[in-house]
Amino acid sequence: MKERLKIGVVGLGGRGLGILKDIMLPMEDVDVLGVCDLYEDRTKYGVDAVEKARGVRPIGTQNYKDILNLDIDAVLILCAWEPHIEIAVAAMKKGISVGMEVGGAYSIDDCWKLVNTYEETGTPCMLLENCCYGKREMMALKMAKDGFFGDIVYCEGGYQHDLRGEIAYGEENRHYRLRNYINRNCENYPTHELGPIAKLLNINNGNRMMTLSSMSSSSKGLHQYILDKKGADDKLANVHFRQGDIVRTNIMCANGELISIILDTTLPRCYSRNFTVRGTKGMYQENGDYFYKDGEPEDLGKLYGNGNVYEKDENNLHPLWSNYEAKGGHGGMDFLVYRAFVESNLMGINPPIDVYDTAAWMCISTLSEKSISLGGMPVEIPDFTNGKWFNRTDIVDFKYSLDWQTNLK
């Protein structure tokens, strides 16, 4: 087992710089040898952050290939969505482990490149999907193992987040979402809601996603926001945004479960991931924050919504959270997903969100784009495991494991 992990960081926008400063640099077993961003000022911020925290000035560059030429064990890909897979494939070919921030894929071929490169090289690739490590999501994972839900038949989730300001001011803030919303209409950010659900339903480990069907509303929210906030003379005022305001995607699984996910980012709303689990014996619903067990009075279900009785019972918390003092972004789940990446690399084991999960979750974007263009017609979801999902032998049981067949100790 390695004692220290040498890493490079690619992408130093808001998310990337925050992860570097608040999550990675406080980890005493991680050394940051190089940082990269297309923008020179962002690169400088990264270099300065490392020097301030560690007293050592890392390599700074605008070309990710310079990072991959360093003597590093792993690379964090925290940049705009489009080059994620290109950089990941290049890193794996050099034997550099990949930790990749979330986003959807642009083609099925790219997803296969990830899988094929991993199988050719044996170099791990982990999707850094932090929502899998959320307190509620992990509690539901634990309770599923304990049989609270019975047989799970339906799960729902969403990326429901008012991003109109971020997108409308994308050029001023150099944010990649703007060009994506102009040019694509799809479920562009599926993994926040799908990741926890996929682990709950044992996707790629005894189950798999078979088909999806997606439909989209019209696109009006961004146009109205730009008129209201920036005025009719702004150059975006007459731009047609292809991305629909609401995209709904339904996914059928091999074991009969139905998954429904929603993208809702360009109309006025409060934040929600709408995480919902429905089973033969119980349910969980994020909106209202309550569990309900079959046979209990309905008013007791409402009480859970007010006070979440189950969360107060340590027996129902996932072990990672039962004695966990939250630190890092998003209530602590950022820290957990990055520790899962670091520790799996130090131990030399398969990461808890592996390349097959990465490809399966990311492919939803490009498949939803196809389904929407065909009026909601169902499209097939590839089996990126090539049949290995029947009987996985490479799932590792360690404290960050998300496969609920494990001991959860």
Image: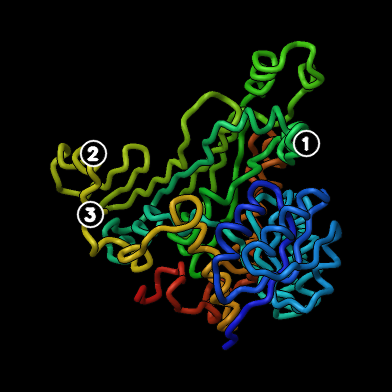
For this view, does 284 lie left or right of residue 49?
left
Q: Give percent across and percent down for residue 191.
A: 57, 51
Q: Residue 179: which disc?
A: 1
Q: Residue at x 49, y 54 (%)?
A: 131
Q: Residue 312: which disc?
A: 3
CA distance for labels 3 and 2: 12 Å
Q: From this viewpoint, is residue 373 visible? A: no
For this view, does 200 lie left or right of residue 224?
left
CA distance for labels 1 and 2: 41 Å
- Vertical arrangement, residue 126 with respect to residue 272, above or below: below
Dot 1 or dot 2, earlier in sequence: 1
CA distance for labels 1 and 3: 44 Å
Residue density around tag 3, few if under 14, some if 14–19, many if 20 or more, within 10 Å: few
The C terminus sits in image quarter: bottom left
Q: Residue at x 32, y 47 (%)?
A: 284
- Vertical arrangement, residue 173 with respect to residue 13, above or below: above
For this view, does 67 lie left or right of residue 402?
right
Residue density around tag 1, few if under 14, some if 14–19, many if 20 or more, within 10 Å: few
Dot 1 or dot 3, earlier in sequence: 1
User: At label 1, which amino acid type do we have?
Assistant: Arg
Residue furthest out toward the top: 232
The front one of 323 and 406 is: 323
The N terminus sits in image quarter: bottom right
Dot 3 or dot 2, earlier in sequence: 2
Q: Residue at x 67, y 58 (%)?
A: 49
Q: Secondary structure at mark 3?
A: helix
- Check disc 2 and report the residue beneath it: 306
